[in-house]
Amino acid sequence: MTRAPGTTGTLRRLHHRGVEWEFDKVVFPRDFSRNVVTKLLVERAEHGGWELDRVRITADGTRRVVLRRKIIRAVRTA
């Protein structure tokens, strides 16, 4: 899968109750239409398991999107 324009990478964070999340920050320039951004985010959700965490639209029209997904650890059985 190709990465969206402006992808800044992932980071991992541990939240309450031992749930660990992986975050991905994506920046879309102002010349991307709402429909294009929606299609790109839906593709990432369907194929990568990402869900929308936060969207910030700046004064210049740039969209800064934070996606997240749970990190599922395999538990070794005896």
Image (cartoon, grey):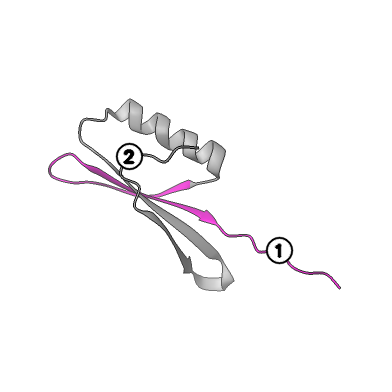
The quadrant of the image that shows the C terminus is: bottom right
Q: Which mark is residue 74?
A: 1
Residue at the location (78% across, 69% down)? 76
Residue 15 x %, y %: 49, 69
Q: Toward the viewer: 8 or 32?
A: 8
Q: Which residue is mark 2?
A: 5
Question: Callout 2, which amino acid?
Answer: Pro
Q: Is residue 35 above or below residue 74?
A: above
Q: Position of residue 43 (x, y in %)?
A: 48, 34
Residue at the right extreme of this rendering: 78
Label pair 1/2, CB-CB below 8 angstroms: no
Above/below status of 55 relative to 78: above
Q: Residue at x 51, y 61 (%)?
A: 21
Picture quadrant where residue 62 is located: top left
Range covered by the magenta-colored residues: 51-78
**Is 58 included in the stretch rendered in magenta?**
yes
Q: Residue at x 33, y 39 (%)?
A: 5
Kindly report which numbered mark, 1 or 2, lies closer to the viewer in this rendering: 2
Amino acid type at image mark 1:
Ala
